[in-house]
Image (cartoon, grey):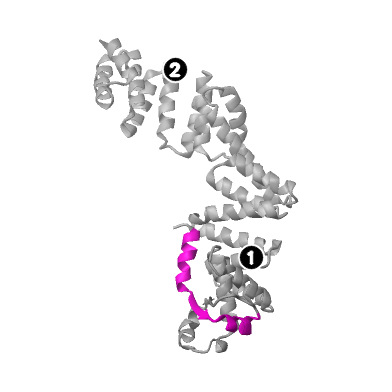
Amino acid sequence: MNPKSHFKDKLSQVLFLEIKKENIKRLFNTEVNEDIYIPVKSSSIVNQVKTEKNVGKIPISFFIEGMFYVIGADEKFRFNDIYNNILINIEDSDKFIKGKIAENIKHKNYEDAYILLKGLSKTENNIEIYDKLLIVVDELRKLDKSYEDEELSLIEIVKKNKNYPMAYFYEAIIMREQGDFEKALFCINNYTENGGKESLEVTEFKESLKLIINYEKGKEILYDSPKEALSLLLPLVNEFGNDAILYYHIAVAYRILENYEKAIYYLNESMSIDSNIMEVINEFGINYASLGDYETAIAYLRRAFEATKSIEICTNLIMCYLNNNDIKNAKLHLEIAKKINPEDDVVVELDGIIK
C-alpha cells in the first residue's frame, strides 16, 4: 500500500466528535457556518473522550493534535480549511505540536511524526519544517521502500518553492540507490551549485559516482570500443581492486584486441578473488583456444559447461575438439548441443562441418 492510502487508513484510529458551530466559536474563537466534526488523535485517551459528555472538559491539546494529524494524513479532508483557521487562532498550537513531533521522533514513531509535520507545514510554511519533513521521510524510506515516491514528491515541492539545496542531496542518494548514477551526479552537483556545503562526504560522493559512471560506460562500450573501454576500466583497478568482475571485463577487452596473454593475466587476477565465476572460466577457454592451446582450453570449457549447460560454451568446446582433431568428442558434444537447442545457428553450422 502506498503511503497516501496508508495514511488515510490510519484516520480510522482517530475519533471524530460532532461539535455545534456555537461551541466552535466558544472553544476556538473561530466562526464557522455549520456544525463540524473535530478529531481527537491521542489513542491513550480515546476511551476517556468517548465517555466525556461535555466537550468543554476535553483538553484543547487533544483537538490540536487531532486536527494537525488529519490535515497531514489526508490533504483533501472536508474540514481541513476550517481546521487550519482554528489552529491559527489557538495560541502556541505550533509549539505544542512541535513537542509532539519531537516526542514521536524520540520514540522512533517516524510515521506519526511525518504526518504531524505534513499538517504543520500547511500552517507554518518554512525551511525548518521542510528540513524536518525530508529528514523524517528519508528515515521512513530507509525502513520501507514504498516511501520512495513520497520522498521524491516532497523533494520536487521543496525544489520549486524553497531555496533549499539539501533537497538535491536527498534526491542524489535515491538516484544512486536506483542505479541512475548520472542523474545522481547531476543532483549532487546541483546541491553544491545551489549553496550546499562541499564537505568531504559530498566530495567523496561525487568521486564515487564518477567512478561508477566510468565503470558502467566501460562495460557498455566494451565490444564496440575496447580501447576506450580499457581507458575507463584500467584506472578503476586502484579503487575496485577486489572486484573480480572488473578484472573480467578488462580481460574481455584485451581478448577483443587479440592481446590474449594480457587477457589471461587479468583473468588470473579475477580468479584469485573469486574462482567460481563461470564467465571467467569460459574466457580462459576462449583465450587459450585463440593461442592454439586447445588442451588447456578444453579443460576450462568443460568445467564451465558442466556448471552452466550453456549452448554457447558447448559450441566453443566442440570447435576446440575439432581443432584438436578429437572428432569423437566433437560428435558427442554436438549431440548434446542439439538436445539443448537444435536450431542454434552455430550448432547447425557445426553439424554441417562435422558431416
Asked whether disc 1 touches disc 2, contact meaning CB atoms under 8 Å apart, the reply is no
- Is residue 135 positioned above or below 244 on the image? below
Q: Which mark is residue 122?
A: 1
Amino acid type for the residue under numbered disc 2: Ser
The spot of residue 255 in percent (x, y) is: 50, 22
Q: Nearer the viewer, residue 283 or 127?
A: 127
Q: Residue at x 33, y 26 (%)?
A: 311
Is 257 included in the stretch rendered in magenta?
Answer: no
Left or right of 266 in this view: 343: left
Closer to viewer: mark 1 or mark 2 = 1
In this picture, which residue range is highlighted in magenta?
3-29
The image's mark for residue 290 is 2
Choose top left, top right, bottom left or bottom right for residue 230.
top right
Q: Is residue 320 above or below residue 7?
A: above
**In the displayed structure, would residue 287 be above or below residue 67?**
above
Q: Nearer the viewer, residue 135 or 5?
A: 5
Residue type pointed to by label 1: Lys
Distance from label 1 to label 2 (Cα)? 70 Å
Helix, strand or loop at label 1? It is loop
Residue 240's x, y, as percent? Answer: 57, 40
Q: Residue at x 70, y 45 (%)?
A: 190
For the residue pair 183 and 252, the one nearer the viewer reads as 183
> In the rendered image, which quarter is residue 306 located in?
top left
Q: Residues within 10 Å of mark 2 (few under 14, many from 20)?
A: some
Under circle 2, the secondary element is helix
Point out residue 59 in the picture as x, y percentages from the top left corner: 58, 85
